[in-house]
Image (cartoon, grey):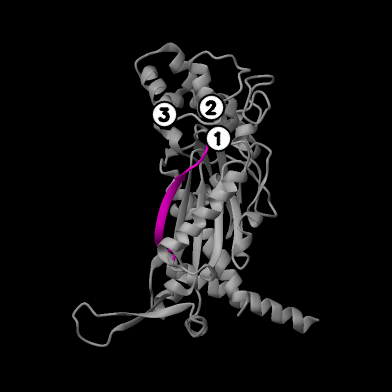
Amino acid sequence: MMVSSARSSTEQLRIGNAILVLDALRQHGAAAHTMIAERTGLSSATVSAITAELEGRGVIERVEQIAATGRGRPRVLFAPKRDFAYLAIIIISSDTVQFSLADYRGTLIDRFNEARQTNPDGPEEFVVMLRQGLARLLERSQIDGDRLLAITASSKGLVASDRPVLMWSPVFGSKQVDFQAVFDANRHAIISLSNETLLVAQAIARRLDRSPPSLTALSLGHSIGLGIVTTAGDRESVSAPNFGHMLHQSGGALCRCGARGCIEAYSGFYAILRSAFEVPEDTIPAKFVPLSELDKIAANARRGNRMAEFAFRQAGLALGNGLSRLMSLYDFMPIVITGPGTRYYDLMRAGLVEGLGQSHIVAMRGMPDISIIADEQNLAFSGHLSKALSTMDQAIMQTG
């Protein structure tokens, strides 16, 4: 039993080191043995053994680098083999679905967007759209479906922790979507589904090189999303609490989830629209509000319209109150705001700062650092790439 345990531990170490090498090659580009050892902290002998195994299996390939002078022998570098495997990335928004195809090196090959129904009766047409979009993605790049090793999707809403099932979404409510069943024709592929803001938080942490050690990513849009990254030593923890549907005001405005008084019921796009036009709080919320409508309200607010200003300030206050409670439960941490709603942050800022300031921890330590990164879709794509490629590497090495 002890021998078996030792073998298992050695095998896990081998797999972990190989994944470390592959991640370094993708993150920093093609590299020679010495550079790989420097970037991973592995010994030269370990790197040589790993690259020999990976090259023998066709997972990585040699890339020759000609000297700048044009003289001498070319330098041998290693890189993941582009066509070893492929992955599809599907980012689901309120009004569109983005389909992307990437190779094993993490390079984007193709991308397109499909408009989706914003008021469908059920998920059946949506499932057909997803299947057709994936088929089109492969056909456009002439990629055999058998070479698609991973299909990774993301959406706002509640995602099951143990399987790729969308438990609740702003468009379909409690009508669940099982992505394993959606892509049942691609059973050889690894199917995964993530909360979009969780991936965004991961991508921001990676972009910042995991410094500071903890951060909160707040997504503003039709829905309100939240991702939290905390690190302790080398261990990273990522979570996506159901922030938008935390209680803001007991018995308050009607939310898309059916409850009353949620944070989103005051700060989502539909909530801002409702407040600006003084629509009764028990009015059934719109599932989708065009950005052009919010832009008009924002323009009125910047011209001094009282109700338009109030709508955005109230949205900021609800967000600030929620974040202040979050700081008390988790820890004091910087906040990165992302999503389409960042274009209205100037109108929400005063309310958000006021809401945060009501927290004891903020009163003690001062206002947390708040920054803006508007391009949420690129962050989500980066998060998908990182997570899916790591999963692919793990599966490939375990079958070796």
Region of the chain picked out in magenta, as a range: 106-118
Q: Quadrant of the C terminus?
A: bottom right
Where is residue 7 drawn, in percent x and y? 70, 82
Q: CA distance from mark 2 to mark 1?
A: 7 Å
Q: Quadrant of residue 121?
A: top right
* Residue tagged 1: 224
From the image, give the main secondary structure of the stretch colored magenta: strand
Where is residue 350 drawn, in percent x and y? 45, 23
Q: Quadrant of residue 67?
A: bottom left
**What kind of element bears circle 3?**
helix
Mark 2 neighbour class, 10 Å CA radius: few under 14, some 14 to 19, many 20 or more: many
Q: Earlier in the sequence, mark 1 or mark 3?
A: 1
* Residue tagged 3: 344
Residue drawn at 62 percent across, 29 percent down: 256
Q: CA distance from mark 1 to mark 3?
A: 14 Å
Looking at the image, residue 8 sits to the left or right of residue 294; the answer is right
Q: Quadrant of the N terminus?
A: bottom right
Where is residue 357 drawn, in percent x and y? 54, 26
Q: Is residue 114 above or below residue 295?
A: below
User: Could you tell me the amino acid type at mark 2?
Assistant: Ser
Q: Is residue 132 visible?
A: yes
User: Could you tell me the amino acid type at mark 3?
Assistant: Tyr
Q: Are marks 2 and 1 in contact (CB under 8 Å)?
A: yes
Residue drawn at 63 percent across, 17 percent down: 282
Looking at the image, residue 2 sits to the left or right of residue 171; the answer is right
Looking at the image, residue 157 sits to the left or right of residue 88; the answer is right
User: Could you tell me the amino acid type at mark 1?
Assistant: Ile
* Residue tagged 2: 267
Mark 1 neighbour class, 10 Å CA radius: few under 14, some 14 to 19, many 20 or more: many
Where is residue 119 drawn, in percent x and y? 56, 33
